Image (cartoon, rainbow, N blue to C red):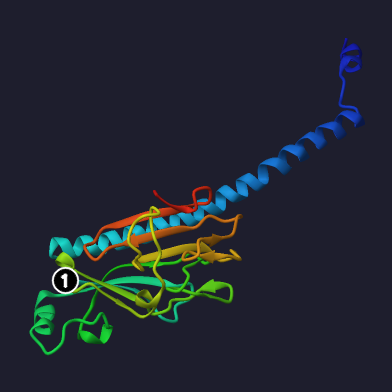
């Protein structure tokens, strides 16, 4: 009986194994590029969401009155780039407003800042202009954006103020109130000319003097930014 069972047991022939391997190779060849692209997009989207959350949290603190003046800084010399949100007390802001000059968004404008939030960029991400690509990681440029309740003392410092304007929705007024998020290996990442690498997605975080923060993704078909 045992001998008969052994005779009825069949394995794969060499030809069948070769056909199976060929099928697996084809499926893998088709699926891996799509998975790789999805994985890169997921990393970029996650980074954009974290930056959006940091800006939103910082501006919310202003509107609640917890900190009347908040500075979001792309810390100079940090690698990977570090983004930090700092706030000051009402007493310090009042002293500055009543002085000879208004707040300038310089860290040296106030004697004391309180860190309220921070984020270290993913090592594979870089932010053009605000955190330019350098070597194999992004580095902080020292750019800063300051928010106040009602937007009265909204200021931009460094490259946050000097980067070029872009247009949203094909019909809005040009603005430089944005942070563009690209992959470090992108060969093209130009939010002004809308020129990007086909292999990588590009996200953008737009902020306003009044605290509104919105995340966008560049739509390569319409050649415009789509709210996300």
Dividing the picture into quarters, in which one does residue 60 lie? bottom left
Image position of 138 (left or right of 162): right
Residue 124 visible in the picture: no
Residue drawn at (45%, 53%) of the image: 224
Residue drawn at (23%, 78%) of the image: 113
Camera-side residue: 163 or 16?
Answer: 163
Q: Quadrant of the N terminus?
A: top right
Camera-side residue: 152 or 149?
Answer: 152
Image position of 167 (left or right of 30): left
- From this view, report whether residue 202 is shown above or below residue 10: below
Residue reaching furthest bottom? 100
Residue reaching furthest front? 171
Image position of 43 (left or right of 23): left
Q: Which residue is mark 1?
A: 152
**Dot 1: element:** loop
Locate residue 32, reporting x and y percent.
67, 45
Residue reaching furthest top? 1
Number of callouts in the render?
Answer: 1
Camera-side residue: 190 or 18?
Answer: 190
Dividing the picture into quarters, in which one does residue 117 lie? bottom left
Locate residue 40, reporting x and y percent.
56, 54
Locate residue 87, reporting x and y percent.
22, 73
- From this view, report whether residue 83 is shown above or below residue 13: below
Residue drawn at (39%, 60%) of the image: 167
Locate residue 91, reporting x and y percent.
9, 78
Dividing the picture into quarters, in which one does residue 195 lie? bottom right
Badge 1 density bin: few <14, some 14–19, many ≥20, Cα 10 Å: few
Camera-side residue: 3 or 204?
Answer: 204
Residue 44 visible in the picture: yes
Residue drawn at (55%, 60%) of the image: 196
């Amino acid at each position: 009986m045992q001998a008969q069972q052994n005779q009825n047991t069949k394995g794969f022939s060499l030809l069948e194994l070769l056909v199976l391997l060929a099928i697996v190779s084809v499926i893998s060849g088709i699926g891996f590029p799509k998975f790789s692209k999805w994985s890169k997009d997921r990393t970029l989207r996650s980074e954009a969401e974290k930056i959006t959350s940091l800006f939103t949290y910082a501006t919310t603190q202003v509107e609640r009155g917890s900190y009347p003046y908040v500075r979001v800084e792309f810390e100079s010399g940090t690698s990977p780039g570090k983004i930090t949100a700092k706030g000051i007390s009402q007493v310090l802001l009042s002293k500055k407003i009543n002085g000879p000059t208004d707040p300038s968004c310089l860290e040296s404008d106030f004697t004391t800042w309180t860190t309220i939030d921070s984020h270290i960029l993913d090592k594979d991400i870089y932010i053009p202009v605000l955190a330019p690509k350098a070597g194999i990681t992004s580095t902080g440029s020292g750019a800063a954006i300051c928010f106040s309740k009602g937007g009265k003392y909204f200021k931009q410092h460094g490259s946050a103020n000097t980067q070029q304007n872009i247009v949203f929705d094909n019909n809005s007024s040009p603005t430089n109130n944005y942070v563009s998020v690209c992959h470090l290996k992108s060969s093209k990442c130009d939010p002004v000319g809308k020129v990007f690498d086909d292999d990588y997605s590009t996200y953008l975080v737009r902020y306003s003097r009044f605290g509104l923060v919105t995340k966008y993704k560049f739509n390569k078909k319409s050649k415009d930014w789509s709210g996300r």
